[in-house]
Amino acid sequence: MTDNTSGILISDAKDDQSYCTRFADGVSGMTVTALAKFCGTSKSAITQLLNQISDCDPFTNELVECLKSFAGNDWRLFTNDPSGKVFIIDEVCHAVLEYYALEARRYKGKQIAVNNYRMIAKAGLRVFIWSQTGYSPAHATSGGIISKEELSATITAALERALTPINQRLEQIEQRLSALPPAKPKRPWTLSASTPPEEVPEGYQKLEDGSWLSPEAYQSILRQSQRSLFWDLRRLRDFE
């Protein structure tokens, strides 16, 4: 971690994947690249979603529920970082991660978002309880600021002991998705005369040329014939 004179703590960057925390209020953030990796998607996809959030009209808000409260707001975390990096506020990062884990359609890296969302949810419960009991991890350190090793140990403990309601919800969603029946293929409307009788599905009607007509095709032709018949009857009435 790098402590600079601008009042923020910035992680060592790896391929522009960096994180920061403001000393003044503890508000944190991550770069677009870091958030993209966290969600298992591309940087361009994250940028497009962030622009959609900031461009959304709060009155006609059509964003999904987890993103609604950020409609029309600036998602950038303003710092005095001399490198000029753009950081996304942690609350927005969490909402975006929730969107990709729970709301977005299945995509190649979705499981990464699901796993990271589970991790954040578990660790977040421990931090919430700290806020209720008045505990601060700085109290357990001699230097006043928690070290990287102590933070890692704290998060590990939170992951092991926290309750898992989000896990249960995700498992229910996964079970429902896996239980969905596969899409039923459309049956061909016609079968050639060379089709063996044992391969002809039930309900098909044999035509004069030996080919087969499906029930769906028969009903479609019947409806078209009826509409034509009604049109001819109306014309006859006009001539009477």
Image (cartoon, helix red, strand yellow):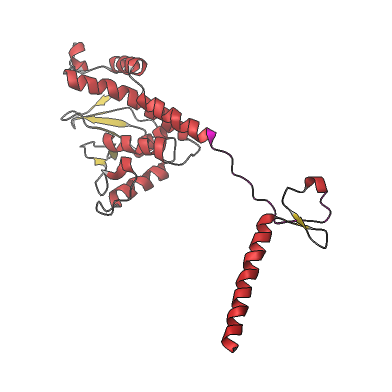
Residue at position x 32%, y 34% in the image: 94
For this orientation, the residue located farthest to the front is 240
Residue 58 to residue 239: above or below: above
Q: Name the foreground residue: 181 vs 58.
A: 181
Q: Is residue 182 left or right of residue 52?
A: right
- Residue 40 horizontal/vertical position (percent): 44, 35
Where, quadrant-wise, is the C terminus in this rendering? Answer: bottom right
- Where, by quadrant of the figure, is residue 26 drawn? top left
Q: Please count the marks in the image.
A: 0
Where, quadrant-wise, is the N terminus in this rendering? Answer: top left
Q: Name the foreground residue: 190 vs 168.
A: 190
Residue at position x 81%, y 51% in the image: 195
- Residue 216 horizontal/vertical position (percent): 65, 56
Q: Name the foreground residue: 196 vs 41.
A: 196
What residue span does the magenta drawing correspond to?
A: 179-196
Residue 144 to residue 222: above or below: above
Q: Name the foreground residue: 48 vs 98.
A: 98
- Residue 234 horizontal/vertical position (percent): 58, 80
Residue at position x 41%, y 41% in the image: 43
Residue at position x 79%, y 56% in the image: 192
Q: In this view, does 207 lie to the left or right of 230?
A: right
Magenta stretch: helix, strand or loop mostly: loop
Residue 19 to residue 156: above or below: below
Q: Is residue 135 left or right of residue 205?
A: left
Instruction: Give yes or no for residue 192 being in the magenta stretch.
Output: yes
- Residue 90 horizontal/vertical position (percent): 28, 34
